[in-house]
Every structure is written in C-alpha cells, then in structure tokens.
Amino acid sequence: LCETSSFFIVTLGCGSTIAENCTYFESTGNNAVAGGCRTRLCKCSEDICQIRLDFLTFAITGPSTDSASVGAILNGEQVKTANGKQVANAARCLTDTFAISNQDTVPVICGTNTGFHVYFDVSDACHDLDFAFGQNAVGVTSVANRMWSIKVSQYSCNYENLAPSGCNQWFFGPGATNIVKSYNFDGGKHLADQTQTICVR
C-alpha cells in the first residue's frame, strides 16, 4: 500500500527509472518542446501484481478536431472506392500521446486527464511511461501547455483490493458517488481508438 507514513516520497522526471512504491513522475522544465519524455517503471519487489497510476495533473495536446474525410474504410480495410465508410482524423491523438509499454489493456491517450487513474497488470519486464510530443499542432489550433504529475502505486499479489484483471479503472467504497468518464472527457472530446474497461464494486 502507498502511504506517506510508511514510505518515502520520490519525485522523478524524464529519463529516470522508478523501482520504488509511492513515487511521482512529474514534468519539469520546458515542456513545450517537441520530442518525448519517458521514465521506466519496474516492480519494487517480486510479489507485485498490479500498478495504479493517479493522474494528479495531466494536460497534453488533445485530439484532432478536423472532421474532413481522409479516406474510406470497408470491412476494416482502406479502400479507394465510394463503397466504404468515410473516415476522418477527428478524435485521434495526432500531436501528443501517452502510452504504457508491456501491457495490452491501457490504450494510448492524450488531452486532459487530470483526476483520472489507470490500473494495469504488471509484467516481469519493466514498463515505459512514454510521452511523445509533436513539434506542430495537427488537427488542433495549438499545442498545449504540457504538464503532468503521476502518482505510482504498486500492489502486491495478496493485496485484498486488487482491481479485476483487465480493468483500466476501478471504483469502490461504501457510499461512493461520482460520474464514470472516458479518458479526455474533461477535454470535451471522446478519444478515437479506445477500448476502456471501467469496473465498479
């Protein structure tokens, strides 16, 4: 469990490696530059089964709002005939992205995700928390003032409140009330290419 009374707090930036419980991955310096920011997240002990990321602050450039057609799709394949369904770049993350390596349940996201969280099952290999930033705004008017503060909590396999396997978000507790939201909901546009599993107990 990640409690400040029993763990020291470590704050790390780009290019670091996290192998402790209750750490923070935060933006520092000039975050408007193109390129990326990656930190490596490794298990703090052999009995770790799950990781939770709390996005205390999370703001990167949001998805494209360009609704102009970029082609046609038929049976999942791009076609050059008029028979397909017209598709656009709207809602796709074309400028900035955030991805987690070595897992297959958390989608690539962008936009405003402050207050959101994500769970994923731990791989024996480390996980890269990977921000990629575009030089130019694509499908949006400008790049965001990029900033993030991500709390990393690691849970042992015998922790009594692990999220069910495959759940991206896990809500629990007596009397809890809230609104379940998809990623970038507060950014005003649902993200394309998402498969998100939200679980409630």
Image (spheres, helix red, strand yellow):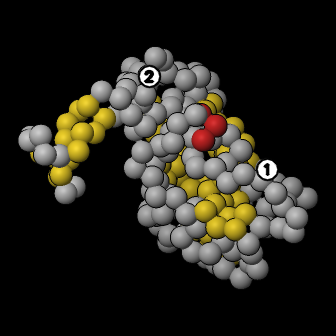
Q: Are marks 1 and 2 in contact (CB under 8 Å)?
A: no
Can you see residue 44? no
Q: Quadrant of the C terminus?
A: bottom right
Residue 7 locus on image (x, y percent) = 82, 59
> Three-letter amino acid code at disc 2?
Val
The residue identified by callout 2 is 140
For the view shown, which residue lies furthest in the bottom direction? 158
Q: Residues within 10 Å of mark 2 (few under 14, many from 20)?
A: some
Look at 87% across and 69% down and name the residue there.
174
Residue 124 locus on image (x, y percent) = 50, 72
Look at 59% across and 34% down and name the residue there.
187
Is 156 placed left or right of 120 in the picture? right
Q: Nearer the viewer, mark 1 or mark 2?
A: 2
**Element type where label 1 sits in the image:** loop
> Three-letter amino acid code at disc 1?
Ile
Look at 30% across and 27% down and name the residue there.
68
Is 91 placed left or right of 17 in the picture? left
**Which residue is more in the foreground, 81 or 170?**
81
